[in-house]
Image: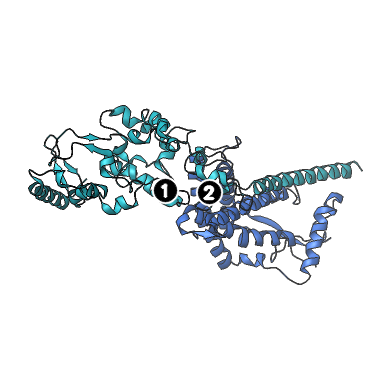
Chain colours: A cyan, B blue
Amino acid sequence: MFSTKRKKHVALGAVLASLLLMQSDLSFASQSDLERNEPCLRCHGMKTFGYVKPETGKLVNLSVSQAALDQADHQGNLCVDCHRGGYRKMPHPQHKVTADTCLECHEDERGFEKYRMNAITAHFKKSVHYQMQPEQFNCFSCHDPHAGRLHKMGDSTETVVEKSNQVCLNCHSTLLPFEESHAWLPNGQLHQKAVRCLECHTPRPSSVVHAIEPAAKAEKDCVACHSRDSILLTKLNKYRLGRGEDKLGFVNSVVMDDSYVLGMTRHSALDKLGIFAVALTVSGVSAHGIGRWFSRRRGKSS
Amino acid sequence: MNTESKTQWMLLYPLWLRAWHWTNALLFIILLTCGFSLHFADSGWTLVPFATARTWHNLAGLALTVGYLVFVLRNWTSGNIRHYKPDWRGWSSRLLRQAHYYGVEIFQGAAHPFPVRREQKFNPLQQLTYVCVVYLGLPTLIVTGLLLLRPELAPEAILGMAGLWLIAVVHYLAGVGLTVFLIMHIYLATVGKTLTSDLKKMITGWEEVTLADPR
């Protein structure tokens, strides 16, 4: 996770921060300071802020990038909106009051229906991650609330795919290298750039992509995507379907801004033309052959 | 016509040409079967599973490409290319003459209007078709096929859409065109002197050649 150089920096940052904050608390912070997140970012804004967890010996990164926060969906939020209590003393005590899941704010019942958190939670609880490690796994295991930004209409598919796959690769590039686990997949690198891991690693049909399945149950049927009723229509391209575009007569032409998918972006008229041309040729040569046979019989009999 | 002309058996289809022809025949069948299975994967009419079809289509396509390059080179250096060079004098009227034979005279038991000669073993329609297939259809199929094999080399966008779409459409149309050719080619192999004489010549390489100029 951290390089050796980074570890040294983090350790140094932790020592400096501890010296600075030892015996101090946040009582000096004014309300206006808190509204600018200033007291928190004074320490957590440092790039190398973190500590070594005694129980595991692993570095815990406590740094929050101001630049990442500024473009995140939570950019308008205050730190104390989620980190609600137990932070006045520094170093902070073990038991703090923090929102542990997105649901604590984004419940459907609180007016956040558009995020479909209830459905996402139900799917998440079926995921292999939650099933294997229910205590350790929560929303923030994958989604960084300090930097996360939902995909917006108009985002290019390339950007959506890259950002989505990076979430998986943050862990799986070291746990289970893509090249090894996907050696069976033709043009693996191209697939990785063109579609999200989620297309194949969540059940179909479903537009909620949090029920991540075990590798053994992953989609391996090429035709699932390479067909008129491609699963990409309900997943990666679900937000485009309402546009009703029909480019040059292609089926599923809504995806053609970014990609041509064999078997999916088909042209009905050309498909029919091909079948008609072959059928016409077979009929023509058959008729010609029958004509030759009759004329030869007639020639012999006369 | 020319029933009294002198004839002689000649080796008009040397071994390299026959080897290319029959290899191509096998590759065409593989490419056609697998290409159909890939394009119409969800039709329920496919003969080969998608992943297998992809592997075989790619391998056969590469073999077709190598074979094509060998053919073009050997066709040129061996002098066999003379059969592909049209004689423009009276070209259109000879095309019509051949078409009339296939459309009318063949049913009347008439002799072939353009018997095989040492300098020209193809009839005018056959020559036109072969020139189109070998020097237009096959290169189109091969170039578009190679771009589909290495899509990163294709243009990023054509007419505001992903660049592969036009390449895929041209590849599909070239495939359809060559499938139509294959069907007609197999059928027209039965209109020689006997039902199997053309088949035999492509196995042995020998053909009965008319020595006198039929024109």
Amino acid carrying mark 1 in the image? Val
Amino acid carrying mark 2 in the image? Val
| Horizontal arrangement in the rendering, residue A168 relative to residue A12 (left or right) | right
Secondary element at tag 2: helix
Percent x, y of residue A181: 34, 39
Residue at 18% in and 36% down: A86
> In terms of image quadrants, where is residue B1?
bottom right
The Cα atoms of the two marked residues, 1 and 2, are separated by: 14 Å
- State the residue lying farthest toward the right: A302
Residue at 71% in and 50% down: B184
Instruction: Pick whichever, A174 or A208, lies toward us.
Output: A208
Percent x, y of residue A243: 57, 47
| Horizontal arrangement in the rendering, residue A199 relative to residue B26 (left or right) | left
Residue at 63% in and 53% down: A248
Any mark on residue A160, and which? 1
> Which chain does tag 2 point to?
A
